[in-house]
Image: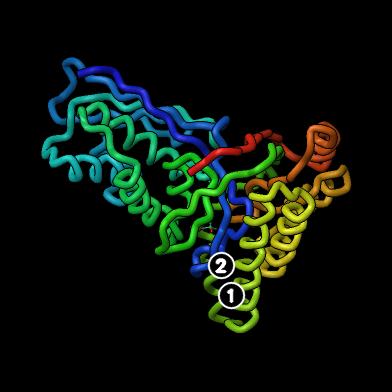
């Protein structure tokens, strides 16, 4: 059997996180420069039917079977084997190398699951189609997040900007001009499951105002989608700011994120907001080639532990 290497990208939610869990539309883009890579190779003379997993970022160096039954990686492997009708775990080694920080709002868990399932299915001679991969990755997300919308696995599997709405066909969206973003890490780790559960509690306590904010976020996502497609940077930035105001109102931001967001805006970002689960993790700023350096410096001065950059290229012709 050959040595197989596969990868998957990180993701950024441009607009609509959390509201998407409640059926509202959200806009997500791939972060192709930040990736997870998986390598599967035969384990010559390894114990038959044993897969050894090594993943430094997850502090794993052990046989798959030694992981708890509800571990998302174990589930990812089992789902692939079941999908392909393989009854014995192949005798192999799986190595995972991730540049995506964990619990930081960038989709690390979904990307690890997707890259693993891509590599393993190719190793077994049957690379999974995107649709199947997406369906299986969603199952692993349920273990990680409890009540995921499915947006993370979808944007990561297709690696294209999408407008996502639960239960509806995926809508691909195309920017009509180049877009430039900076992403800054607050350094605070926060599992998405926690912030999703927090909002669910808030919603039980005060359904009226939480549901109104959620519906408003949905409208902003649609306005932002239009601006994204029309290349209207001002309107897109305004949508990001308006979204952030509602996320902060829902208590999903935090002081460190707020400081980064204010610093980015003051340095010339057209819009800035948290991205992903919030209450820590990363924020996202819409910049131009002219403002990029000033915003980067301002983010670092405001305490960002890391600043990333990603660009989306204009797409003129598409189906
Ligand atoms: C996490 O990237 C986005 C959330 O909306 C959760 C989800 O949609 O599953 C917070």
Q: Nearer the viewer, residue 36 or 127?
A: 127
Q: Quadrant of the N terminus?
A: top left
- Is residue 191 something that shows in the picture? yes
Q: Would you say residue 67 is visible in this rendering?
A: no
Q: Secondary structure at mark 2?
A: helix
Q: Based on the displayed image, in which of its 4 quarters is residue 225 positioned?
A: bottom right
Q: Is residue 128 above or below residue 169?
A: above
* Marks 1 & 2, CB-CB < 8 Å contact: yes
Q: Residue at x 50, y 49 (%)?
A: 172
Residue 84, how many percent across, how many down? Answer: 17, 40
Instruction: Identify the residue shown where x is 69% and y is 59%.
Output: 253
In the rendered structure, find residue 212 and report the number of the disc placed on it: none
Vertical comparison of 194 with 96: above or below: below
Q: Residues within 10 Å of mark 2 (few under 14, many from 20)?
A: some
According to the picture, the residue beneath numbered tag 1 turns out to be 202
Measuring 33% from the left and 53% from the top, which residue is drawn there?
139
Ligand 1 is within 8 Å of the C-beta of the residue at disc 2: no
Which type of secondary structure does the marked residue at label 1 adopt? Answer: helix
Q: Is residue 317 left or right of residue 248?
A: left
Query: Residue 286: percent from the left, percent from the top?
Result: 74, 45
According to the picture, the residue beneath numbered tag 2 turns out to be 198
Distance, label 1 to label 2, CA atoms, is: 6 Å
Task: Out of 283 and 197, give the one closest to the viewer.
Answer: 283
């Amino acid at each position: 059997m050959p040595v197989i290497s596969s990868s998957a990208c990180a993701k950024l939610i441009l607009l609509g996180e959390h509201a998407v869990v409640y059926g509202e539309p959200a806009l997500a883009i791939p972060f192709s420069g930040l990736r997870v890579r998986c390598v599967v190779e035969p384990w010559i003379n390894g114990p038959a039917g044993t897969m050894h997993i090594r993943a430094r970022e997850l502090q794993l160096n052990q046989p798959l079977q030694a992981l708890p039954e509800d571990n998302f990686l174990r589930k990812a492997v089992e789902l692939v084997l079941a999908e392909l009708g393989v009854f014995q775990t192949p005798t192999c080694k799986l190595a995972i190398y991730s540049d995506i920080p964990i619990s930081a709002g960038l989709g690390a868990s979904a990307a690890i699951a997707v890259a693993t399932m891509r590599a393993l299915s190719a190793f077994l001679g049957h690379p999974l189609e995107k649709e199947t991969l997406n369906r299986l990755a969603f199952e692993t997300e349920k273990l990680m997040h409890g009540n995921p919308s499915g947006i993370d696995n979808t944007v990561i599997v297709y690696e294209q900007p999408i407008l996502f709405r639960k239960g509806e066909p995926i809508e691909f969206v195309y920017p009509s001009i180049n877009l430039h973003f900076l992403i800054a890490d607050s350094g605070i780790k926060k599992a998405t499951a926690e912030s999703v559960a927090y909002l669910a509690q808030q919603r039980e306590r005060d359904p009226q105002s939480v549901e109104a904010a959620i519906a408003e976020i949905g409208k902003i996502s649609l306005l932002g989608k239009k601006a994204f497609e029309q290349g209207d940077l001002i309107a897109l930035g305004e949508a990001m700011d308006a979204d952030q105001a509602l996320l902060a109102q829902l208590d999903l931001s935090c002081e460190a994120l707020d400081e980064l967001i204010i610093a980015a805006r003051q340095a010339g970002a057209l819009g800035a907001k948290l991205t992903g689960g919030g209450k820590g993790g990363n924020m996202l700023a819409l910049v131009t080639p002219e403002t990029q350096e000033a915003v980067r410096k301002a983010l670092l001065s405001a305490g960002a532990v890391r600043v990333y950059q990603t660009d989306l290229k204009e797409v003129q012709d598409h189906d």
